[in-house]
């Protein structure tokens, strides 16, 4: 696997991104290569301080860039007007076949735009979608889309079901995933027109093990493996999850304080274990499914650990050939109205 | 206050609904009346077994009905075809001025449809919206709409901000609420066309203390008091909250088990306290804001406690004259495009 990492993107870039790349050294097989895309001086200084063995150092390569897309830049404009920005160069490397995986914790919109523009969509795929793994008591649930496409067509959701299923099998070991569509009630008549049309498409598609509408609460009940939704709703619930989980732990600690510091100390190991299980950083990046190559989008707040884990996920995606599976299944699926 | 309670609606009806009405007896002032709407035999048997004092019993009145709208009935058809159903009769009582508040844990869609049809909207209000109070570490946050209107216009969201603000002031003591619109990023350019138009309307409205876009995670950070969104997104995050909270507590208990049953026993009082604070049943029903009269929609799984609390909220709404405030503010607001 050759992975191109955007060294300049993310709230903790470049330090945390580079550290994540060094921490991934132990994961690399002899054929793996890490292409460090960004400011040359910064990267070379990082390499010098990295304490990697001479042998490992040969697996890292510097790809100098001179522009940076900021977290608040307008995605489409930035991609067009900053051709030498790390996000653009990173996607160019995949486009030219010089890298298999692109990883960035930078501007998500720019990353989606650059990947779509340069890597193009896989044959048969209408629109890419971002998939995330949500850890639940009953196991991982894949949600797609969480923000690439905020006003999708029904056909896009049908394809998200196929793509997210292939991804879930590769990284979370979910076979023949049960697929649901996020809506506001179990009955067929519930939901927007888009949801109703998408449901009909999925129900009629033998490649999808479709279980029907899923309500927000069902996601946590072990009844579904893949949940599809539009990118607006998906993005909101993704960030909502982050907020409510942090808020709940904050509340628990505050209540424990009232029982004395002993109670807090006793609960901390439990909390750490749970936090680790619910920690998005453990899942590395979220793939932009449906583009020609692998593109992993990391949280803007990613620490070194998230970057290291994204490199691991990149290896899993390449080894399991998720994109080939997606192309095969999309070709066999019933075409929907665009 | 005269409150009409749908005795037949909800997963635990009629027993839990009636019990909630008896439990509310202590809250009733001498002028308050509870109109029990439903099967006469069931209600009379309940009254006989209620152990209420003779004096309190005079505050309860039976309104016999002969039809029931099921949880899975199609809302609009059921409201039209079952004129003697408890939900319809309950809303008729408010329409005729015989009750001030309607409370139901039955079919939400039917409740919204019946209230809109019979109670009509308040002067100037385009569409009603359901508001819920979400407890957070930093205090209550009101979210509107959570399911009355799944494809709203920008003007509806602007009105939700005004109505939910008046409600928040009345039941949660939030003065001059900070209002945000739920979207997928802080920048103005983020969101659907509807969200962008609604944001512009709210920004230009002096009656709204508007703080801009709110992401899912910000809801839990103490930066916002009222969050407006379309009813599709709102309903999904409402149920999502329920699922993730239950799932997280389930996870905590399972982890504590590994530390032995002593750890579980020690944590239980903490958990109970937090659970109570995060418990939707404490907030009783969610008001359908914007209709002519008060209509509180309770969770289908409501226990007696939720019904009792809904009666308490009904009293608060009547006493604080929320609807008069809504009418005044809507009249002073800048009219938006319908």
Image: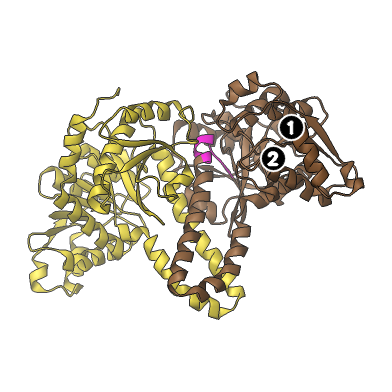
Chain colours: A brown, B yellow
Asked which quadrant contains residue B13, the reply is: bottom left
Residue hosting label 1: A39
Disc 1 and disc 2 on one polypeptide chain:
yes
The residue positioned 64% from the left and 23% from the top of the image is A79
Residue at image location 44% in from the left, 34% down from the top: A192
Counting from the top left corner in percent of width and height, residue B98 is at 10, 49
**Stretch of the chain drawn in magenta:** A227-235
Q: Residue furthest bottom?
A: B262
B256 versus B113 height, above or below: below
Q: Secondary structure at mark 1?
A: loop
- Mark number, residue A74: none
Could you tell whether A273 is left or right of B200 in the image?
right
In magenta stretch: residue B282: no
* Cβ atoms at labels 1 and 2 below 8 Å apart: yes
Q: In the rendered structure, which disc, 1 or 2, sits on the residue that comes first in sequence? A: 2
Q: Please determine whether, in this image, residue A250 is positioned above or below residue A184.
A: below
């Amino acid at each position: 696997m050759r992975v191109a990492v955007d060294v300049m993107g993310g709230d903790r870039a470049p330090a945390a991104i580079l550290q994540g790349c060094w921490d991934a050294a132990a994961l690399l097989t002899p054929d793996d290569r890490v292409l460090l895309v960004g400011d040359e001086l910064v990267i070379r200084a990082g390499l010098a301080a990295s304490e990697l063995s001479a042998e490992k150092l040969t697996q890292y390569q510097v790809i100098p860039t001179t522009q940076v897309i900021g977290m608040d830049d307008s995605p489409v404009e930035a991609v067009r007007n900053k051709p030498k920005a790390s996000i653009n160069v990173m996607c160019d490397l995949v486009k030219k076949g010089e890298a298999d995986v692109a990883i960035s914790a930078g501007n998500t919109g720019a990353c989606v735009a650059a990947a779509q523009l340069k890597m193009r969509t896989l044959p048969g795929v209408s629109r890419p979608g971002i998939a995330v793994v949500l850890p639940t008591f009953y196991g991982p649930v894949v949600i797609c889309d969480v923000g690439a496409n905020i006003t999708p067509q029904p056909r896009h959701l049908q394809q998200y079901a196929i793509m997210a299923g292939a991804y879930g099998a590769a990284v979370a070991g979910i076979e023949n995933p049960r697929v649901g569509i996020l809506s506001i009630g179990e009955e067929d008549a519930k939901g927007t027109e888009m949801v109703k049309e998408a449901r009909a498409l999925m129900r009629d598609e033998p490649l999808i093990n479709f279980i029907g509408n899923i309500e927000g609460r069902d996601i946590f009940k072990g009844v579904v493996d893949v949940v599809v939704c539009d990118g607006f709703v998906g993005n909101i619930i993704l960030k909502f999850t982050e907020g409510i989980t942090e808020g709940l732990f904050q509340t628990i600690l505050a209540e424990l304080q009232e029982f004395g510091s002993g109670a807090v100390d006793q609960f901390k190991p439990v909390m750490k274990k749970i936090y680790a299980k619910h920690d998005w950083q453990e899942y590395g990046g979220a793939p932009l499914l449906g583009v020609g190559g692998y593109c992993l989008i990391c949280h803007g707040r990613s620490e070194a650990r998230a970057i290291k884990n994204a490199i691991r996920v990149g290896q899993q995606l390449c080894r399991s050939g998720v994109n080939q599976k997606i192309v095969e299944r999309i070709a066999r699926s019933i075409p929907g109205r665009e």
